[in-house]
Structures are given as C-alpha cells and as structure tokens.
Image: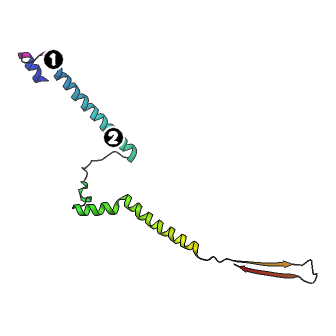
Amino acid sequence: MRQTRDRFNVGEVTRTDVAQAESSLAAGRSQVLLAESNYKTSVATYRQVIGVNPGTLAAGTPVDRFSPSTLPAAMAIAISANPTVATAQFNVDAAQLQVKVAEGALYPNFSVQGSYQKSFLSTQSPTTLESYGASVSGS
C-alpha cells in the first residue's frame, strides 16, 4: 500500500491503482480476522468436545505406512477386504446351509410322546387310595 501511494505521488500510477491496493489490503485484513475467528471457534469446539483446552499440537504422522508397498500386495488386500467379496463368501455359506436344511427335510421323522398320571382317593373304588397311569406312543 505504501509503495503504491509513493508511486501515485510521483505520478506513475492512477488513483484507481491506489484504490485497488487499499481494497487488497482490506481483503487481507479481513482474511486474517476470519482465520482468527475460525481458530477461536475451533478451540471452543475442542474444549466443548474434549473437556480441556488444546495443548501444543503436533503434526500428524503420514498414513503411508498403512499402505501396501507393492501393487500385488495392494491387489491381494483389495480382493480379501472387498465388502462385495466378503458378502459373496457369506452367501455361499448360507446357500450350503440351505442345501443341508433341504436334505434334512427328506429324512424320516420320529416323535415320541409320553404321559404319567397319579390320582388320589378314587371315586370309583373306596378302597383304592392311589392309582397310577402311564402311556407312551411313538410314530
């Protein structure tokens, strides 16, 4: 801004150039104020979420160490970790179990039922104090 005014005083630039320089300076100051506002908002959000003020922040570590080093290794991980492949493998397992259920429906069925009954003081015979009955049926 100072250089533009000096150049205007010697007649090298016009009043429009000075106004553009003033506008650029004002835009820069506005961006600084916006950045400070964003910083204070971020600190307040951090304090609200974490519960303490942020300490000295360090740069994050690169995530390249998690990436495979070769293309074949990347392809192997992509094939084994692909959700579509995992879904297909689970569908194969489910289909095999459905086949076993269908085969089980072809086997014979066997059922057993039993009952046991004990009665006290029979009304049919005054001398009988207790009577027992049992039955078992199978099909």
Q: Residue at x 10, y 23 (%)?
A: 3
What is the number of the mark on residue 125? none
Residue labelled with disc 2: 42
Q: Is the residue marked by circle 2 packed among few (<14), some (14-19), or many (20+) residues within 10 Å? A: few
Query: Which quadrant would the N terminus be assigned to in this image?
Result: top left
- Answer left or right for 136 relative to 130: left
Residue labelled with disc 1: 16
Give the magenta range. 9-16
Q: Element at badge 2?
A: helix
Query: Which quadrant would the C terminus be assigned to in this image?
Result: bottom right
Q: Nearer the viewer, residue 99 or 41?
A: 99
Q: Mark 1 or 2, which is nearer the eye?
A: 1
Q: Is the residue marked by circle 1 packed among few (<14), some (14-19), or many (20+) residues within 10 Å? A: few
Q: Residue at x 41, y 60 (%)?
A: 87
Q: Nearer the viewer, residue 70 or 119?
A: 70
- Going by the numbered disc 2, the residue's amino acid type is Ser
